[in-house]
Image (cartoon, grey):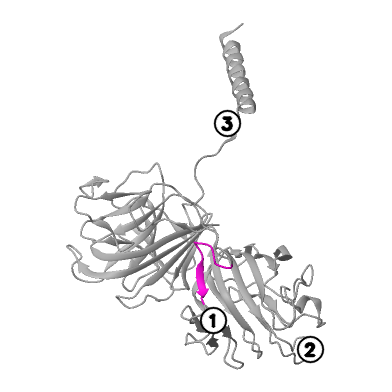
Amino acid sequence: MTCLKKLLLALFLAASAITACAQTDPKATEVWDPEPEVVLPGAGNKPPSDAIILFDGKNLDKWTDQKGNKPGWIVKDGIVTVKPGSGSIITKQNFADCQLHIEWRTPAIVKGNGQERGNSGVIMQSRYELQILDSYKNRTYSNGQAGSVYKQYLPLVNASLKPGQWQKYDIIYTAPRFNIDSSVKSPAYITVLHNGILIQNHVAIKGTVAHVGQPKYQKHAFALPLLLQEHEFPVSFRNIWIREIGVQKLLNGKDKKDWYTYLDTLGKDNDVHNNFAIENGMVHVMGKYFGYMATKKSYDNYYLKVVFKWGSKQYHPREKGVRDAGVLYHFGEGDKDIVWPRSIECQIQEGDCGDIWCVQHTNVVTPNKSAIEWDQQRVYRTANFENPRGEWNIIEIICNGNQIEHYVNGHLVNWGIASLSHGRILLQSEGAEIWYKSVELTPL
């Protein structure tokens, strides 16, 4: 037998042994990492431990009207009731994939019929409506009764209670994903339990709610407010809470676990001057030393939300002029740590928030204004939406394959096709003090 045949036979026997072991050893199929986070279920009618309380019976501090003003709805005895004519209300916080619990009640005194009886709605992302209606012995078109995805899907059953009784929706919602050409990558999906009974089973939403004509999608930001509809009827609500699904908090507010630091002249994990500090649950970047704080892991296909505000201090050689920092992403695991590494940058600079910098000769194909500066491509944002210094700003980055989008305070300001599609995420230190309240990532 030749040496080659002997080698092939040995490799075959070794592979067979490994396969046989995998099929007989139960440990071969055990997954220990990561370990799921502990969430405590709420006792009785209480929310789970990780829920965001949207209405606790006391006030509407987490809501505004659609113009950003204080809501005109009536809060009394732990209940909020629609004031007819005051307009719909929206959450101050934006949401994407989520689990929503909401309890509602139509008026006990019945007036009208069909759609003119206890009409309201839970409108996911201010666009996709789950109908609220008094549908107890009240016939209307089936895809417009309580529990319908309005004018799209009728409920599997009618689980409505009598007027004046408290009812509840438990909703599992997946936000739609869009490509940069505005086409739909994947539609929104919704599952609904009405009073504990399944009425919508992971149905694909067909588009924005439409009273006349067919629904259709219009591209929008990944995360948007929840809307409760005012439709001229005094519908009441209580016990509203929401859980974000799939959100990974990259900053834990306690330490720099899962991150490392790199500073010019000092190197990796040698932050002897505490340039990156954890204070009051936030990352405080002193900014005196050029470098970055980087994730140990690489990521691709995600939505990234970064909340920041400027401090007051500036350092040489940037002690004068605009404050400068940035979120760099797609820094390859095999690439060397340097100032600044091969990556794509979402610029955080006073007056220039949302610009794209193609670091170390990366590139982006884009219809937006572009130029070569400092021997690298710069893509200018289409408009400036940065809040004044001292106020919090929200940067959102969508990485969909090699498609990238930059949002500043809810506004799409830059996009293109990048030469990179995955890698680590960096928070830059470049001569200016800056605070990061949160860095959150949602896989797409």
Q: Which secondary structure type mostly characterizes the magenta part of the structure?
A: loop
How far from the left and from the top, in percent, is residue 143?
77, 76
Tag on residue 411? none
- Amino acid type, mark 3: Ala
Q: CA distance from mark 3 to mark 2?
A: 62 Å
Graded by Cα atoms within 10 Å as few (under 14), some (14 to 19) or many (20 or more), the crowding at tag 1 reads few
For the residues carrying marks 3 and 1, which lies nearer the camera in this image?
A: 1
- Amino acid type, mark 1: Gly
Q: Secondary structure at mark 2?
A: loop
Graded by Cα atoms within 10 Å as few (under 14), some (14 to 19) or many (20 or more), the crowding at tag 3 reads few
For the residues carrying marks 3 and 2, which lies nearer the camera in this image?
A: 2
Tag on residue 113? 2
Tag on residue 78? 1
Residue in front for this viewpoint, 245 or 205: 245
Q: Secondary structure at mark 3?
A: helix
Residue tagged 3: 28
Q: Within the image, what quadrant is residue 243 found in?
A: bottom right
Please give left or right for residue 308 compared with residue 314 in the image.
Answer: right
Graded by Cα atoms within 10 Å as few (under 14), some (14 to 19) or many (20 or more), the crowding at tag 2 reads some
- State the residue at coordinates (27%, 57%): 277
Whether residue 288 is situated above or below residue 78 in the rendered picture: above
